[in-house]
Amino acid sequence: MLPGVRTVASRAVSAGQPRPVALAGAELREWMALRRVCEGAVTKLVAHWLDHGRPVPCYLPDVLDDLTCGGLIALADPDPMLSGMRRAIITPAGRTRYLQLCAKRCPDSESPRRKRTDNDAFEPCPEV
């Protein structure tokens, strides 16, 4: 690390305070689901949610279903070339919620829209 340059994690350690975890339980699962949808590789095939072609972890399908019912994510029209697979798309309301959760997850950071680095807690979310 460069002299005089400190990351959020090193600042918390140097101050002798544990790093705050602002998200837990349902909010954390919601953030994880929205982050995956923002990455653009979440799809639904019949009743199965997939991420990059693999089943999502067991704690996310219900969350993804709830986000779909709540209008935070939408499903694209079925692709006939891919056996009716439907891509998940974040809606404007979902993007707003994702940014709120990002801000809550790491309140010391300036903005979730800045360029992502390896030490960054925020994931970029594509424009809708």
Image (spheres, helix red, strand yellow):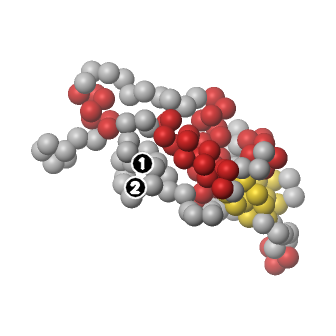
User: Which one is nearer the viewer's eye here, 24 or 48?
Assistant: 24
- Look at the picture and state if 27 lies above or below 102: above
Mark 2, Cα crowd under 10 Å, few <14 / some 14-19 / many 20+, is few
Please give the label number shown on residue 43.
none
Q: Tell me which residue sits at (71%, 43%) in the image.
A: 60
Give the structural element (helix, strand or loop) at label 1: loop
Locate residue 50: give its quadrant: bottom right
Relative to residue 20, is residue 72 drawn left or right?
A: right
Instruction: Determine if residue 111 is in view.
Output: yes
Please give the label number shown on residue 111.
1
Q: Tell me which residue sits at (15%, 48%) in the image.
A: 2
The image position of residue 93, as x and y in percent, is 67, 50
Q: Single out the residue that lies furthest toward the top.
A: 16
Give the structural element (helix, strand or loop) at label 2: loop
Check disc 2 and give the amino acid type: Arg
Q: Which residue is mark 2?
A: 114
The image position of residue 107, as x and y in percent, is 43, 35
Locate residue 52: give its quadrant: bottom right
Marks 1 and 2, how far apart at CA? 6 Å
The answer to whether the residue labelled 1 contacts the one labelled 2, judged by CB atoms less than 8 Å apart, is yes
